[in-house]
Image (tube, rainbow, N blue to C red):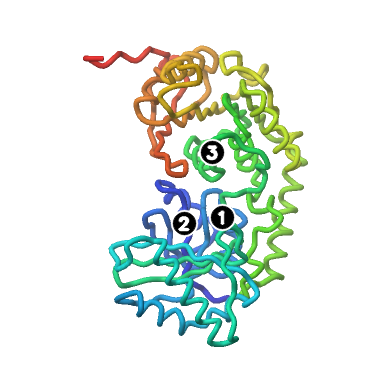
Amino acid sequence: MPAYHNLIVTCPLYCEDLVETELRAAGLTDLKIHHGAVKAKGTIEHAYRVCLWSRIANKVLFPLLDFEARDKDELLTTLTAFPFPDHFSVNDTFAVESRISHTFFPNPTIASLVAKDGVVDSFRRRFGKRPNVDTKRPDVRLNLFLEGNKGTVSIEIAAQGLFKRAYRRRGGEAPLKENVAAAVLLRAGWKEIAARGGPLIDLMCGSGTFLFEGLLIAAGIAPGSLKESAGPEKWLGHDRLLWRKLLEEAADQKRKVLSGRLPLVHGYDFDRTAVENATVNLKEAGLLPYVRVKRSDFTAVKKPAGQKIGGLVVANPPYGQRLGGGANVASLYLGLGKHLSEEFDGYRAAILAGDRELARAVGLRAEKLHTVYNGPIRCTLAHFDLSPANKYRPPREKKGT
């Protein structure tokens, strides 16, 4: 029987429940939700499947060492004694990322530097030489978590962050993270809408992140299968035959579903460069035949003609106070709500707003509100049922304004 290991799957804040659902479906056990992570038990195959198939995870961490340390010297001694050369080569580059809480380090940067010294000394003890550090594109990424005097050192199973799907060759000024876009769509019920044959309409598609993630979800394509390199190639515990087998399974699934019938996925943006970027990204990923991208202001977008099944409309409008030229962002949200009410009766809408006030400015009654972090930005995801009972009404101004 394959050995079960402790695994840590990190994710954007407030998406832990979505990751838990993914891990449970993948067969992992003993799931426990933490702040920005889910801990679980699983085999190496489970870990690989999460790397390939998770739409929400940031990283899959394989713990190497649990320890206690009262100060930085004790941490350095503990890491120096650990056999890091059993896990990667002295010829590989590495980096250490740290998360600390209530501990003896003043900041994560210093913790990472001490941990780096411990790893280097571990190699020097065995080989008399050390691996180099590369903080931008290392061959191996180590993760130090330290809370109080207790800590864990883990190795990242995937070579890069899982949210980097590798389909976005061109991006806008503030692109939506891929796994955050997937979380928005899953929260909005897109998987179920797509299964019924409903379309996906992105009114402000930018470089096309919602379009990509919407197609991957609807078709059941593994996000990790789009990468040239998504696996743990430099980890000495890597099972290459198993990884290759799982990659081939995912590739077969992709070919099969793309030859079948898929729901409509349409994207619009008034910015010519954004439309060009989305088109190039889709073309290079081989997905352009399955998505329609067009330059248009959102106020000109209509429901697809002849489409009887209600779909999902998504938008990621600007978050700031002002638009270019000094126009108020709230006025854009007002126009968005009015257009949704008039043109998309029978659809659902999901608007990723900068905050609750901007969500309120849409002028429609929200069924649900979710907190979503797009990188460091705290956003409000508002869900709307675009029915005759939920017609657009301009929000009342607050007293004193």
- Which class describes the residues within 10 Å of circle 2: few (<14), some (14-19), or many (20+)? many
Q: Are marks 1 and 3 in contact (CB under 8 Å)?
A: no
Instruction: Give the labeled residue for mark 1.
Output: 161
- Using the numbered discs, state the Cα–Cα distance from disc 2 to disc 3 in whole angstroms: 18 Å
Residue 274 left/right relative to 123: right
Instruction: Give the labeled residue for mark 2.
Output: 10
Q: Are marks 2 and 1 in contact (CB under 8 Å)?
A: no
Q: In the drawing, what numbered circle is on residue 176?
A: 3
Residue 379 location (% of width, % of height): 41, 36
Residue found at x 38% / y 77%: 75
- Using the numbered discs, state the Cα–Cα distance from disc 2 to disc 1 in whole angstroms: 10 Å
Residue 3 location (% of width, % of height): 54, 76
**Quick one: 25 or 153, which is closer to the camera?**
153
Residue found at x 67% / y 29%: 264
Query: Going from the N terminus, do you reach mark 2 or mark 1 first?
Result: 2
- Which class describes the residues within 10 Å of circle 3: few (<14), some (14-19), or many (20+)? some
The kind of residue tagged 3 is Leu
- Which class describes the residues within 10 Å of circle 1: few (<14), some (14-19), or many (20+)? some
**Quick one: 122 or 45, which is closer to the camera?**
122
Residue 190 location (% of width, % of height): 55, 36
Q: Nearer the viewer, mark 2 or mark 1?
A: 1
Residue 331 left/right relative to 106: right
Residue 71 occupies which quadrant of the picture? bottom left
Query: Going from the N terminus, do you reach mark 1 or mark 3 first?
Result: 1
Query: Going from the N terminus, do you reach mark 2 or mark 3 first?
Result: 2
